[in-house]
């Protein structure tokens, strides 16, 4: 009977040790994540890739605006009746295109700066969430260890009560 009880205690101690080892591994992993931060090559490569995709999309959008405006003016010029009106429209188109291109260039510069900040902030947020999840996992495992310890102690107490001091239980 005592050997059986000792075997149960040893099994529970082994489970506790395994869970504590898992907790230690998670802590090391979490600390490494926090130490690395968002400046790792992998995360920087992800940011750069998304940055390039978004900037390409922005450039396409801006080119489309200019193309539409140019097309609009070409239609007006085509429909113009006399050469003076055509010249006036051409001059207006040149000025307006220069103005729009300058505005789009400024907008692109602003968006580039904002995009880099936003992508890095998003990665920091995701990293914080991962750390939070690791902390939650650690807490759950620590709670599991405590329950195992309580269960083991109650089993020891029950065996002691049933068999008295002669049970030969291990601690």
Image (spheres, rainbow, N blue to C red):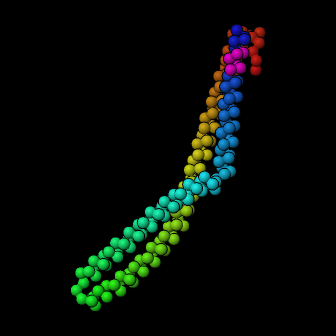
> Residue 63, position in %: x, y?
41, 70
The residue shown at (42%, 80%) is 98
| Residue closest to the eye, 58 or 154 | 58
Please give the name of the residue rendered at 35% of the width and 76% of the height, measured from the top-left corner.
Answer: 70
Point out the stretch of residues depicted in magenta: 6-11
Q: Residue at x 67, y 25 (%)?
A: 15
User: Residue at (45%, 65%) from the top-left corner?
Assistant: 58
Instruction: Work out which residue is located at the far left of the displayed protein and give it.
Output: 81
Q: Is residue 10 magenta?
A: yes
State left or right for residue 97 relative to residue 146. Answer: left
Where residue 166 appears, as percent x and y from the top left, is 77, 9
Task: Please indicate whether residue 27 sits to the left or right of residue 76 in the image.
Answer: right
Counting the numbered discs, the total is 0
**Residue 85 found in image quarter:** bottom left
Can residue 140 be seen by looking at this rendering?
yes
Report x, y in % for residue 103: 45, 76
In depth, the one of 51 and 113 nearer the eye is: 51
- Image quarter where the C terminus lies is top right
Q: Is residue 70 left or right of residue 119?
A: left
**In the image, is residue 139 above or below residue 12?**
below
């Amino acid at each position: 009977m005592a050997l059986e009880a000792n075997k149960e205690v040893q099994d529970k101690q082994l489970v506790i040790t395994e869970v504590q080892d898992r907790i230690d591994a998670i802590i090391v992993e979490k600390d490494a994540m926090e130490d690395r931060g968002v400046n790792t090559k992998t995360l920087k490569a992800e940011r750069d890739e998304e940055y390039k995709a978004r900037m390409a999309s922005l450039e396409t959008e801006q080119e489309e605006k200019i193309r539409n405006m140019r097309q609009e003016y070409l239609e007006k010029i085509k429909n113009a009746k006399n050469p003076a009106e055509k010249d006036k429209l051409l001059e207006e188109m040149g000025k307006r295109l220069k103005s729009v291109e300058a505005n789009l260039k400024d907008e692109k510069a602003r968006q580039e700066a904002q995009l880099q900040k936003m992508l890095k902030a998003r990665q920091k947020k995701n990293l914080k969430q991962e750390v939070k999840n690791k902390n939650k996992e650690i807490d759950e495992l620590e709670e599991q260890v405590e329950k195992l310890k309580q269960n083991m102690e109650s089993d020891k107490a029950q065996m002691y009560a049933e068999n008295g001091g002669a049970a030969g239980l291990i601690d």
